[in-house]
Image: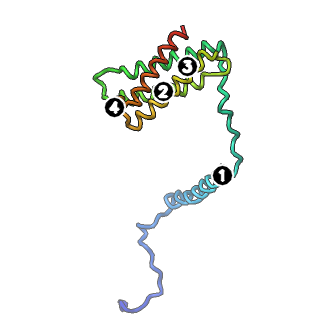
């Protein structure tokens, strides 16, 4: 028996039941190199994204050109947005109120973008101007609604009235 205070020169070895051996030991050896390769690729892509030249911004005044008659395209876009807003603002009363309100805001915000994207220089001014006004009004209504401004607020009520009046005007112009 050895003295417990006596130093040993033997290195500690874990019992063989705790050491990975054979296939288990060799299957874990691939993790570190793969992680290193993935990290290097990520770092390389990050550096490339940081140092590459910025893409040229498109002219914000230039709208995409749609085939066909510009007035017909603009009026079709308006009809689509108007229908979406009508559908989303007059949803099933049994539905959750917040869900209906969120869908209405989404229809107005997305509809405004959709309208702006369907205006091109070929749209006659008598149609393009009210569509721009309607789209801007929808953006103003939706962002104020998202900011918590109620429809009873005088400024929001005015925005709603103006949008409805422009919507009625467009219904006549797009016949």
Rendered residue at 60%/53% (across/down): 38
Identify the residue under disc 1.
50
In front: label 3 or label 1: 3
Sequence-wise, the earlier of marks 4 and 1 is 1
Inter-mark Cα distance, 4 to 1:
41 Å
The image position of residue 144, as x and y in percent, is 43, 34
The image position of residue 27, as x and y in percent, is 53, 57
In front: label 2 or label 3: 3
Inter-mark Cα distance, 4 to 3:
30 Å
Circle 1 SS class = helix
Inter-mark Cα distance, 2 to 1:
36 Å
Position of residue 66 relative to residue 13, above or below, is: above
When asked about the image quadrant of residue 67, the answer is top right
Position of residue 146 relative to residue 5, above or below, is: above
Q: Nearer the viewer, residue 12 or 118?
A: 118
Inter-mark Cα distance, 2 to 3:
12 Å
């Amino acid at each position: 028996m050895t003295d417990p205070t006596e130093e040993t020169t033997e290195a500690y070895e874990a019992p063989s039941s705790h050491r990975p051996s054979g296939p288990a030991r060799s299957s874990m050896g691939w993790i570190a190199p793969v992680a290193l390769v993935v990290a290097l690729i990520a770092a390389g892509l990050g550096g490339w994204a940081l140092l590459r030249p910025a893409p040229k911004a498109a002219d914000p005044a230039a709208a995409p050109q749609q085939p066909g008659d510009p007035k017909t395209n603009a009026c079709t876009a308006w009809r689509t947005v108007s229908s979406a807003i009508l559908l989303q603002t007059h949803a099933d009363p049994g539905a959750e109120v917040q869900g209906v309100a969120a869908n209405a805001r989404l229809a107005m915000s997305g509809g405004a973008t959709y309208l702006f994207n369907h205006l091109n220089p070929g749209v006659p001014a008598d149609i393009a101007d009210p569509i721009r006004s309607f789209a801007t009004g929808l953006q103003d209504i939706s962002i104020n609604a998202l900011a918590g401004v109620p429809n009873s607020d005088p400024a929001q009520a005015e925005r709603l009235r103006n949008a409805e009046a422009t919507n009625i005007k467009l219904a006549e112009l797009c016949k």
